[in-house]
Image (cartoon, coloured by chain):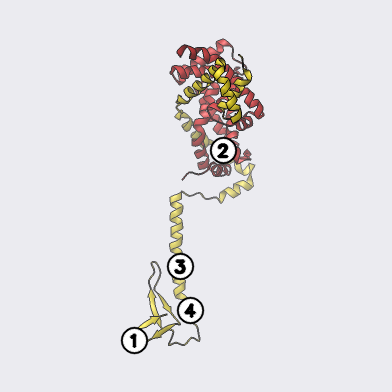
Chain colours: A red, B yellow
């Protein structure tokens, strides 16, 4: 029997730890993946995902709308990632040398597949404000509205940021894909 | 980069947000524009590649989180009388049971209910026959054995004892 998220969230808000563990198991992969794509650092992503769930647990009484649990969860994960990027002074657009360093660490720690490495290289070169929308859209399949709720921007801005992110990714990937094809 | 508006349409198409009419126009344009064709080609290829990526979840998070949750819970229990007395009082009355145990408890309650019902039924037995009821009709006609209950005698007002076969029939 699969219990609906809404029921679990209500039980979790009322202090049921089993409900929390069930929700954690449902969302842990998505949150970890989001953090990994945002930070491009395996250890930092692990810490951010862990802190996200701890904050969820601590702030459960602040969750007013059970239907928007997913947005709330990703918003906290996003804040964790942004805090990390700010703390490490990599919030603004990455300079070339720093982007190279991060890409190398991502490739060495996450995977060795050439094409996947290339795609990750493209994502990490994006400014975080573009990276977050493209990661939420492409890796989490969230709607414009959900992304807007998480990031705190209107749907139109989500759409324009997605366009800019895809244009940048195109510029990065085009030469590589042209070579291979 | 040319055809900026068309490429914006391409991103809407990728997200499934482009209307059918605009899709037809876009496809016409793609057939004639190699830049936009290249753009959608790269986007679709990128999408295929990122779907192939397998990310292993670090099990250390499970272990660390559970241990930290344990300490958080202990802290909140020790702090609760000061922070939220009403809530802590309510929580004291909350009982959580595993599902098999809860089912067992419910079954036991039902069986005990049947047993108690049987005991009280037997005690109330004599008063079940109406006081002024003609005693020749108030003959015991059947004995019911029900699992977990003492024997119950049932009487009927519509009972006729026939003279020929001297058998009792119930109507």
The lab-note entry on whether marks 2 and 1 share a chain reads: yes
Evaluate whether residue A177 shows in this view: yes
CA–CA distance in space, label 3 to label 1: 37 Å
Mark in the foreground, 3 or 4: 4
Residue placed farthest to the left in the image?
Answer: B165
Mark before the other along the chain sequence, 2 or 4: 2
Of labels 3 and 1, the one closer to you: 1
| Res A132 visible | no
Residue neighbourhood size for the residue with mark 2, other residues' Cα within 10 Å, grouped as few (<14), some (14–19), many (≥20): few
Where does the image place residue B139, in percent across and percent down from the top left?
Answer: 41, 83
How far across and how far down the image is residue B21, in percent?
60, 29
Q: Are marks 3 and 1 on the same chain?
A: yes
Q: How far apart are labels 2 and 4 at the CA level?
A: 61 Å
Q: Are marks 3 and 4 in contact (CB under 8 Å)?
A: no
Check disc 3: other Cα within 10 Å, few if <14, some if 14-19, many if 20+. some
* Sequence-first tag of 2 and 3: 2
Q: Position of residue A106 (x, y in %)?
A: 49, 18
Q: Dots 1 and 4: beta carbons under 8 Å?
A: no
Identify the mark nearer the N-term, 2 or 1.
Answer: 2
Give the residue at mark 4.
B128
Chain holding disc 1: B
Tell me the residue that label 3 is attached to. Answer: B116
Describe the element under mark 2 as helix, strand or loop. Answer: helix
Residue furthest out toward the bottom:
B163
**Residue A174 against residue A36 in the figure, above or below:** above
Left or right: B52 as drawn, with respect to A12:
left
């Amino acid at each position: 029997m699969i219990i609906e998220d809404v029921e679990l969230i209500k039980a979790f808000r009322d202090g049921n730890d089993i409900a929390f563990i069930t929700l954690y198991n449902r969302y842990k992969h998505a949150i970890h993946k989001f953090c990994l794509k945002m930070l491009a650092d395996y250890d930092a992503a692990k810490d951010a995902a862990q802190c996200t769930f701890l904050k969820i647990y601590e702030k459960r009484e602040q969750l007013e709308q059970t239907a928007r649990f997913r947005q709330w969860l990703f918003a906290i994960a996003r804040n964790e990632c942004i805090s990390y990027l700010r703390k490490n002074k990599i919030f603004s657009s990455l300079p070339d040398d720093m982007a190279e360093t991060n890409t190398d660490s991502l490739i060495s720690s996450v995977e060795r597949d050439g094409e996947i490495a290339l795609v990750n290289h493209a994502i990490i070169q994006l400014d975080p404000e573009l990276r977050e929308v493209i990661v939420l859209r492409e890796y989490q399949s969230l709607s414009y509205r959900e992304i807007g709720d998480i990031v705190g921007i209107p749907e139109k801005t989500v759409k324009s940021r997605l366009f800019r992110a895809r244009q940048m990714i195109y510029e990065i990937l085009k030469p590589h894909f042209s070579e291979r094809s | 980069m040319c055809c900026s508006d068309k490429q914006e349409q391409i991103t809407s198409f990728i997200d499934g947000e482009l209307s059918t009419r605009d899709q037809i126009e876009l496809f016409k344009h793609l057939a004639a524009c190699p830049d936009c064709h290249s753009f959608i080609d790269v986007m679709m290829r990128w999408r295929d590649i990122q779907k192939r990526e397998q990310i292993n979840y670090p099990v250390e998070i499970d272990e660390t989180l559970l241990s930290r949750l344990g300490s958080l819970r202990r802290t909140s229990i020790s702090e609760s009388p000061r922070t939220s007395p009403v809530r802590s009082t309510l929580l004291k009355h909350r009982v959580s049971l595993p599902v098999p145990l809860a089912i067992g408890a419910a079954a036991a309650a039902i069986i005990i209910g049947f047993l108690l019902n049987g005991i009280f039924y037997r005690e109330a037995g004599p008063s079940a026959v109406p006081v002024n009821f003609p005693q020749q009709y108030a003959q015991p006609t059947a004995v019911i054995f029900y699992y977990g209950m003492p024997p119950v005698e049932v009487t009927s007002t519509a009972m006729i004892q026939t003279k020929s076969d001297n058998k009792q029939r119930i109507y």
